[in-house]
Every structure is written in structure tokens, then in C-alpha cells.
Image: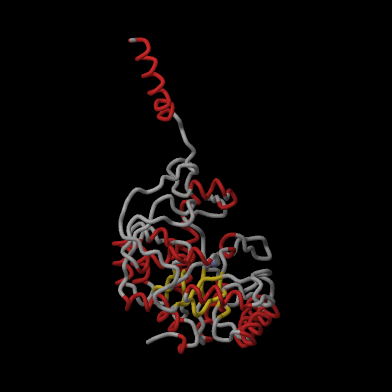
């Protein structure tokens, strides 16, 4: 009887022991939350909004009708396409917009950095930009290749604050168009790829994103180049993409904004940073409510729900949509309507020219 009982105990206990000793992949661990709290899942923004950070590479030839349908579902009234290119490519985009949905899209131009240092390169780039604006561009977007991979004709890295680019930024001030600029990437991409790195999963699944002190330079060097460039051109309005890569240090970002009144920010791809510090983030939004714009970056309509929920609700501990950005959960900031309106459209209407104001409430 005793033996039978211990055998029974072993059978009963063994699977448990095995489970306890079992290791599991980080990627596999995905516990279902048992927390019961009020939920406000939002598929549509409370106010019509402008997405200042979007990419539509085929805008010159695509049927914009499908895009507009998806935008309408989200309550996105205007999309800023930052991938306008320049020259004839840009013309095809602004023409398609003008012919079909003239007040739903704004196109930003891009500078072609090939040939920096060649005789007359700067003058040519400035002239091209003037022409692009005449052809309907309402801003300039600078991609992260400036700083990372743009070299001059001698093969030397062109820094973000390279004086050969100064006339371009000055021309933007003359033309009264903003410059939205993405420099560097999250600092974690430069940190050792180990168990302490918050972006470990992203770097393992996207190894090409890993950087180092000589690939091409330390993170701080790129960020300082950008800030020197901002300060050198106080007449020019800049929009630092992705909260200037300080969404995880809002006190620091606040100091930078205090220091540089010509700089604004958008939160494309960094809402997970705000959603993990709702109190600090809300204070930041209260203080800098005139300097923040709505940006998303990648066009995945279903992901906007997370943005709306972090901005608008008081919800707690809700999931984010991409584990490699955030293995943590989100909390809402519960922003008041007046701040929401500024972030959703009022600031963009003030900073980006030629957006149809009649699409938005006062
Ligand atoms: Zn982007």
C-alpha cells in the first residue's frame, strides 16, 4: 500500500518537476494577462489627425483610393509622405495627389546626397530643392543615411553638421518649409548584444541594425552632430524624428527643446517608450504640448490602435503590437482634449505649410 502510494505521488509530482526545470525561449514566453481592468480598445482617433511620418514609395503610380479608405477608418485626414524623392519622381507624386485627393496628402522632398564635395554640388542641391518646392513639396525629409553612409567624393563620411550642407538648411528657412530629420537609431543598437540589452530581440532578428563605436561612429557623436546642425540654423524649423531618440529620457529631451526653440518632435515608432512611463510622458506632453506631432512611420493601419490608446485612455497594462520594440506592456496617458488636438493636428497645421485647415475642427 505504501509503495503504491509513493508511486502515485511520483507520477503526480513528476510532470510538475519537469515543468519547473524546463527552460523556455524568450521569444516563446508570452503569458496571457490575468489582470481585469477597464479596457478601451480604439480603432479610430478621437479627433481627425495628421500623420507627419509616413512612407508611400509608390505614390507616383498607386491608386490612392485604397489608401484613403484605410486613412478614413483611422480618422487620419492628412498623411505626410516623407519619401517624395526629387525631380521627376516627386512631380509624379504631387501630380497624382493633385489629380485625385489634393487635400489628403502632403509630400516632402529628399536631397540626393551623391556627389557631396564635387564642384557645384551644394548649389545644385539647393536649386533642386527650390524646384521641388515649386513642384508641390511642402517640406524636406532627411533619412538616417546622412551620418551613417553618405560619403563625399573623397570617400569621407559626411557628418550631419557638414558645412557643405548649410545652404540647404538655410534655403528651407527661406522657403518656410520644415526639415524632418532622422539621425542615428536607438542607443541600444550600439550597446553590447547581451542579456542586458533591451533591444536584444530586435538585434537578433535584424542583425543588420547592430552598430558599434566604429560603425560608423559612437551614437553620441551622431546625436551631437545633429544638435550642432540644429543650433547652427536657428531660422530653420526642424522636426526631430522618433523623439530625437530620447523617448526613454524625457528630462533630457525637454532640456534639448528648451535649448533649441526651432526644434519640434514626433513619436514615430517610439510609442512603446511613452506607454511604459505614462506619468512622466504626460508631464512632458503638458509642458511641450506645442512642440509634439503625431508620427507613426511604418504604414500598418492596425498598429495605430496602440498609439490612440496610449495617447487617449487611462487603460493599464495593455499589449504593444511588436515584441521586439517592447516586451513590456502599455499604460495610457489620458491626455486632455486640448493637448490631443495639438498633437493630432494643430501643431502640424502651424508647422507644415499648405495643409487644408477646413478638414479640422477649431
Ligand atoms: Zn521613417
Nearer to us in this view, 227 or 51: 51
Task: Quadrant for residue 10, please give it.
Answer: top left
The quarter in which the N terminus is drawn is top left
The one of 279 and 230 positioned closer to us in this rendering: 279
Q: Residue at x 34, y 66 (%)?
A: 313
Q: Find residue 275 and report its horizontal and vertical position in percent.
A: 37, 60
Q: Quadrant of the C terminus?
A: bottom left
Count of numbered circles in the view: 0
Where 94 sits versus 39, above or below?
below
Residue 269 x, y percent position in the rendering: 48, 62
Q: x, y (%) of residue 192?
A: 48, 44
Q: Quadrant of ligand 1?
A: bottom right
Question: Residue 250 sits in which quadrant?
Answer: bottom left
Determine whether, in the image, residue 139 is placed left or right of residue 234: right
Q: Is residue 97 left or right of residue 72?
A: right
Q: In the displayed structure, would residue 102 be above or below residue 305?
A: below
Q: Nearer the viewer, residue 131 or 169?
A: 131
Answer left or right for 34 relative to 54: left
Q: Position of residue 306 (x, y in %)?
A: 43, 63
Identify which residue, 5 or 255, lies in the foreground. 5
Outermost residue to the front = 1
By what rule are the colours in the image chosen?
Answer: secondary structure
Whether 140 is drawn above or below 271: the answer is below
Q: In the picture provided, is 120 more to the left or to the right than 215? A: right
Q: Residue furthest bottom?
A: 358
The residue at the point 60 percent across, 61 percent down is: 157
Amino acid at each position: 500500500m505504501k509503495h503504491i502510494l509513493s508511486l502515485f505521488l511520483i507520477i503526480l509530482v513528476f510532470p510538475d518537476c519537469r515543468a519547473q526545470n524546463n527552460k523556455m525561449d524568450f521569444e516563446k514566453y508570452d503569458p496571457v494577462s490575468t489582470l481585469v481592468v477597464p479596457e478601451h480598445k480604439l480603432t479610430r482617433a478621437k479627433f481627425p489627425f495628421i500623420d507627419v511620418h509616413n512612407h508611400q514609395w509608390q505614390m507616383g503610380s498607386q491608386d490612392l483610393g485604397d489608401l484613403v479608405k484605410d486613412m478614413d477608418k483611422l480618422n487620419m485626414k492628412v498623411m505626410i509622405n516623407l519619401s517624395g524623392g526629387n525631380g521627376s519622381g516627386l512631380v509624379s507624386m504631387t501630380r497624382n495627389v493633385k489629380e485625385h485627393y489634393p487635400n489628403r496628402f502632403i509630400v516632402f522632398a529628399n536631397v540626393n546626397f551623391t556627389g557631396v564635395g564635387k564642384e557645384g554640388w551644394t548649389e545644385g542641391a539647393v536649386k533642386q530643392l527650390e524646384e521641388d518646392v515649386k513642384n508641390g513639396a511642402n517640406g524636406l525629409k532627411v533619412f538616417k543615411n546622412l551620418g551613417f553612409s553618405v560619403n563625399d567624393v573623397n570617400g569621407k563620411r559626411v557628418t550631419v553638421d557638414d558645412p557643405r550642407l548649410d545652404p540647404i538648411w538655410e534655403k528651407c528657412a527661406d522657403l518656410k518649409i520644415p526639415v524632418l530629420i532622422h539621425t542615428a537609431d536607438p542607443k541600444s543598437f550600439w550597446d553590447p548584444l547581451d542579456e542586458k540589452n533591451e533591444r536584444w530581440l530586435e538585434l537578433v532578428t535584424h542583425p543588420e541594425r547592430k552598430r558599434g563605436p566604429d560603425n560608423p561612429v559612437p551614437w553620441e557623436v551622431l546625436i551631437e552632430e545633429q544638435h550642432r546642425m540644429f543650433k547652427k540654423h536657428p531660422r530653420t524649423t526642424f522636426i526631430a524624428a522618433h523623439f530625437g531618440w530620447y523617448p526613454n529620457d524625457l528630462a533630457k529631451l525637454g532640456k534639448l527643446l528648451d535649448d533649441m526653440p526651432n526644434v519640434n518632435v514626433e513619436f514615430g515608432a517610439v510609442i512603446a517608450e511613452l506607454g511604459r512611463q505614462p506619468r512622466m510622458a504626460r508631464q512632458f506632453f503638458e509642458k511641450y504640448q506645442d512642440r509634439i506631432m503625431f508620427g507613426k512611420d511604418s504604414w500598418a493601419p492596425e498598429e495605430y490602435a496602440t498609439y490612440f490608446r496610449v495617447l487617449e485612455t487611462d487603460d493599464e497594462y495593455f499589449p504593444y503590437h511588436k515584441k521586439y520594440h517592447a516586451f513590456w506592456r502599455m499604460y495610457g496617458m489620458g491626455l486632455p482634449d486640448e493637448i490631443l488636438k495639438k498633437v493630432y493636428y494643430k501643431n502640424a497645421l502651424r508647422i507644415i505649410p499648405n495643409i487644408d485647415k477646413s478638414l479640422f475642427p477649431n
